[in-house]
Amino acid sequence: MELISLAILGLLIVVSPGADFVLVLKNSLNHGRSAGIWTAIGISLAITIHITYSLLGISYLISQNEMLFNAIRYAGAAYLIYLGIKGIFFSDNKTDLQGDTAPSKSGKHFLAQGFLCNALNPKTMLFFLSVFSQVVSTDASDNHVALLYGAYMIAMHFLWFSLVAILFTSKALQTRLLNMKKLLNQLCGAGLVTFGTVLALKS
């Protein structure tokens, strides 16, 4: 597979709506731009984990071990459902959307959320396994292409989700989102519960 095709594939994977997108949107709306960016950083850090075990071949072993794979799958599903339930039942009625103000919780809290949301997703694991099988060389000392592609994926995740955080906390969108904050929080929560349930039930 050509590198250009891999680059386009990576871009499509990043921008496709999923649990990561919903979490960044939820944290940005609830806690401001900074919280969304910290979540994006956590997601990007989780990508380094996927890249590392893909290069080491561990992901293949995990995908062949049904018990271990299911443990990761259920842990990821439970975490998404937990975040979703919080969004549905604990959304506040405040109508002020935060822009670049400081989040109510520390950045580490949102970083951890983003990290766990992505790191515990076995679909992401299998994506990196399939893609890196195309770029990893049999010669361990000649994996510069794989490392460059990994860096590209990390950068794309950070840039895209940071852009999401910035756009949805911008002044231009605030007036439209002002009276929809609680509904959006609940929709995001429902989305996370849905992603988690599908992940848990998928064979």
Image (cartoon, grey):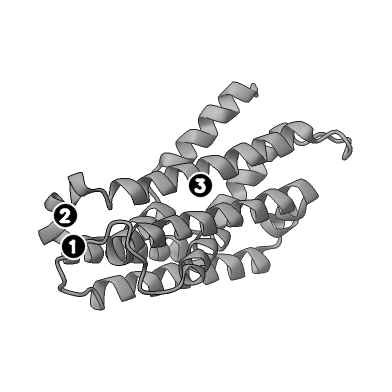
Tell me which residue sits at (64%, 24%) in the image.
Answer: 3
Classify the position of the N terminus by image quarter.
top right
Spatial separation of the CA atoms under disc 2 and disc 3: 24 Å
Give the x, y percent position of residue 157.
Answer: 51, 45
Mark 2 surroundings: few (<14), some (14-19) or many (≥20) residues within 10 A: some
Q: Which residue is mark 1?
A: 181
Spatial separation of the CA atoms under disc 1 and disc 3: 24 Å
- Identified by mark 2, the residue type is Leu
Per the image, label 1 sits on a secondary structure element best described as: helix
- Identified by mark 1, the residue type is Lys
- Identified by mark 3, the residue type is Phe
Q: Which residue is mark 2?
A: 177
| Callout 1–callout 3 Cβ contact below 8 Å | no
Per the image, label 2 sits on a secondary structure element best described as: helix
Q: Quadrant of residue 163?
A: top left
Tell me, yes or no, if residue 131 can be seen here: no
Nearer the observer, 176 or 191: 176
